Each structure stands twice: as C-alpha cells, then as structure tokens.
Image (cartoon, helix red, strand yellow):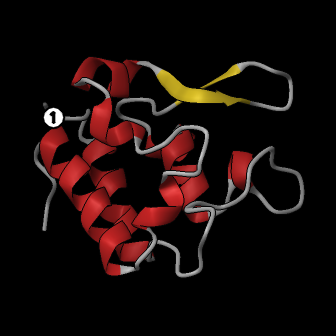
Amino acid sequence: MALASYQAVQNFINQVLQANKEDGGVTQAPHKSFWSTLTYQQFTQGNVPGVTDDKNKPVRILVPGNSAGSALIQVLQGTGIADPKNGAFDQMPANGPPFFTDAQIKEIADWIDAGCPQ
C-alpha cells in the first residue's frame, strides 16, 4: 500500500498505533500525537513539538526526499538520533515493543522519499 498523501500518513500512523495497542502511551509523550494535529506544512517543514535534542536544539520531523536523514524514520527504526548506543532518544513508540515493523516504516519512508506528496 503506497501512502499518497499526508492524510494517508496520519491515518496509517494512527492505525498502526491502535493495532499495537500503543495509542494510549502517545498521550503521555511530550510531543503528543503531533502528526494528527500539525498542518502538512508544519509536519514536512517543522520540528517535533516539545522536543529538543541533547544540545537543546529543536528536532526537525523529516527532510522531504531523504527518509534516511529524517528524525521520524530514525526514531521508528531505533537508528541515528535514536541509536541505543549514542542517540539522544529512545526508539518510538516509547511504550513499545511492539514497534513499527520494517514494512510499516518503509511505507512512511517511501512517502518521504517521494517528496512528501500532499
């Protein structure tokens, strides 16, 4: 299933969290369910609300066209900024496991790599 719009991404994230019974844990996170409340512009160009890195700098949600360089993908995979050895964050969702599967992450990554179609 290819995600063709921001609304499809929002719905997909919510569906995975609900299927994994993890949607309740999101309400306790500092960023809440930001993907559900941000506009397309805020999501594709902005920072994770209420979150800063270990240098107290805001964390950009994603980089259109570059899923590997996007914080959203890194925290779902547990890599980069969420690497357990030296990352500033834990793998998400914080109340996992279960975590997103590689196939589920790829759905979101493909949308980002396609330039984040609106």
Residue 113 horizontal/vertical position (percent): 32, 43
The secondary structure type at the circle numbered 1 is loop
Q: Is residue 25 above or below residue 73?
A: below
Q: Quadrant of the C terminus?
A: top left
Quarter-wise, where is residue 69 in the image? top right
Residue 95 horizontal/vertical position (percent): 61, 69
Residue 49 horizontal/vertical position (percent): 53, 27
Q: Is residue 23 left or right of residue 48?
A: left
Q: Quadrant of the N terminus?
A: bottom left
Q: Is residue 86 above or below residue 49?
A: below
Mark 1 burial class by Cα count in 10 Å: few <14, some 14-19, many 20+: some
Q: Is residue 45 left or right of residue 92?
A: left
Q: Residue at x 44, y 77 (%)?
A: 101
Q: Residue at x 60, y 53 (%)?
A: 75
Q: Residue at x 35, y 40 (%)?
A: 35
Q: Residue at x 86, y 23 (%)?
A: 55
Q: Amino acid at mark 1?
A: Pro
Number of callouts? 1
Q: Is residue 81 above or below residue 24?
A: above
Q: Which residue is mark 1?
A: 117
Q: Nearer the viewer, residue 95 or 6?
A: 95
